Amino acid sequence: MKDLSNLINYRSDVKVVDATLRDGGLVNDFYFSDDFVKDLYQANIKAGVDYMEFGYKASKDMFDVNKFGKWKFCNDDDIRAIVGENNTDLKVAVMADVGRCDYKTDIIDKSESPIDLIRVATYLNTIPAAVDIIEDAAKKGYEVTCNIMAISNAQESNLDVALDILGQTPVDVFYIVDSYGALYPEQIARIAETYTNFAAKYNKKVGIHAHNNQQLAFANTIEAVGDGVDWLDGTYAAMGRGAGNCAMELLLGFLRNPKFNVYPVIQFIEKHMNKLKEDGVVWGYDLQYLMTGLLNQHPRTAIQFTNEKRKDYAQFYQEVVAHD
Amino acid sequence: MKDLSNLINYRSDVKVVDATLRDGGLVNDFYFSDDFVKDLYQANIKAGVDYMEFGYKASKDMFDVNKFGKWKFCNDDDIRAIVGENNTDLKVAVMADVGRCDYKTDIIDKSESPIDLIRVATYLNTIPAAVDIIEDAAKKGYEVTCNIMAISNAQESNLDVALDILGQTPVDVFYIVDSYGALYPEQIARIAETYTNFAAKYNKKVGIHAHNNQQLAFANTIEAVGDGVDWLDGTYAAMGRGAGNCAMELLLGFLRNPKFNVYPVIQFIEKHMNKLKEDGVVWGYDLQYLMTGLLNQHPRTAIQFTNEKRKDYAQFYQEVVAHD
């Protein structure tokens, strides 16, 4: 049982990262209006959010700029058009995906960029490539996190090796990423123990990015807070791939640091997020995501089920069990 | 951190209670079709559910039988029409609300009734009246639970006194009820410790009935399982008052006892629950329920907001903060 004081007091080390544009962009191919992005930036400032992730630094060789909104690529000029000189406490983050980012050319020196933080996303089998991006970003002057995806399928011994390698890089934060929404809180507790042990050894921090396939994204995030995890990802109205993420409005309601304020989040959701849903953008918990989460599978089949507007849940269950 | 084996093995003492008709009936005034109820009964049998709660034994002096569906009153004959002699492993439960049930006349001897379990619902300030119903039901031959509602507002010292009083009655199970959906998992852990300590002293079991205002109904339920709570309430598609309950499909997916089977639940939801939603019956997590949950308030204002089809969440937030 956790200490009673966890719910009354707070750790000032806790940082909140808004991943709405980045993970939410996977739902609408990053086609957010400028009004949406400007209002989100202002809402994050008012809400006391620490980092706003604008999207991916995706390779323009690999992805057609005409087939995605601009936040798939996060040109520095596009960020600058939203944040200006960003003389605020809100820092700017982008994600660099291993194997899908021309980081050597597309990420310039921090002194000339509006970006503060590079989030390096990797699978366990591409750790050496992640190390290259981490070292490049750190040398250019950025804060860096490393987000190890899909760990619900990882062998613990491999995860140990990965964290030990990453500990020796200049990365600032190790991220727990439950890509499949398959983990239960007591597994988060065990994984957080592993991550925080390596973090203590190498003087790093630990973060969490959860998915809501089993309606546990918020529960897993607050479990992690209680276990010493400091960097917490949330998205407005839980917008994110498939079943979505930890809802920012739940997270800020929970956190006790008076710098956080849930009201601007509610205002933003009322103005923008419900409209997105009315316009036909679909995300969030539903039976098909429960099933892939339960079976610890990538949600791609569930996303396809959603996109095809299928409702034959029982048939889909038979299909995913057959895949297992 | 809980024992590793909790997620791999199971306790055979765990019982699952389907509360769809009872808590879901609060959403549609208990107007379920006979087909719905018959199919639910069959689905529960196939799914390995232990108890099916059919509704309330509400006083016909206090409530007009023409203004509610029959499961508000649960006449024995109506239950008999669904279950016959009920030669199955699924037991039949009904709820008796303190102050709203003519239990002396409406609950007959178990030997002549299809009902197995009386669930006595009470607030902390009506414990002596609950004791009367418990003793009456036990004398008539029923299993009995006592569901203490709205404990997120209770003083712990009063709760101790209530459990000590109930321990001396013939009640079988003490129920933790998070009526406002206000509790976090680590509070559930502390409350479960209190309940299980009194349960051990008096040779009782402990149950949990959660609400989903902060998307924690499932998370709180599985936290409770890990803390020694054996009786778990779920509802199909989480149907229940306001933000709804712990989803049966999430719960049966989590439990490891091979007697449980999630597939019949998915089949039932596909056939019946989505149709209810299409017909305009509204329940489930939404911002207004988050707000009353966060502020530890009764959800009645949020239910009114829902019924009026309001979408001005920011204005509602101001209203509930003003109530606080």
Image (tube, coloured by chain):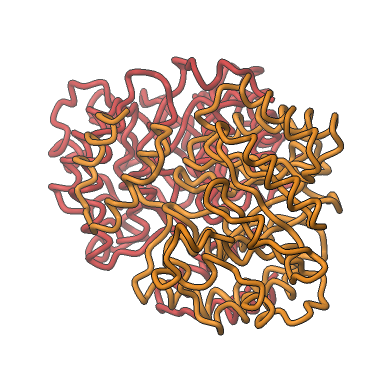
Chain colours: A orange, B red
Vertical position of residue B273 compared to residue A280: above or below: above
Vertical position of residue A259 compared to residue B93: above or below: below
x%, y% of residue A181?
49, 41
Q: Nearer the viewer, residue A169 or B191?
A: A169
Report whether B258 appears left or right of A187. left
Residue A23 visible, this orientation: yes
Report whether B30 appears left or right of A174. left
Residue B95 visible, this orientation: no
Count of numbered badges drawn on the protein: 0
x%, y% of residue A290?
39, 42
The quadrant where residue A73 appears = bottom right
Residue lying at 27% horizontally and 38% vertically, measured from the top left = B265
Residue lying at 79% horizontally and 54% vertically, measured from the top left = A143
Q: Nearer the viewer, residue A37 or A128?
A: A128
Vertical position of residue A133 compared to residue A191: above or below: below
Q: Nearer the viewer, residue B132 or A299?
A: A299
Report whether B15 appears left or right of A252. left
The quarter in which the C terminus of chain B is drawn is bottom right
Residue lying at 81% horizontally and 52% vertically, measured from the top left = A139
x%, y% of residue B263?
26, 33
Vertical position of residue A84 compared to residue A183: above or below: below
x%, y% of residue A304?
29, 52
The quarter in which the N terminus of chain B is drawn is top right
Q: Nearer the viewer, residue B324 or A267?
A: A267
Residue lying at 73% horizontally and 30% vertically, measured from the top left = A165
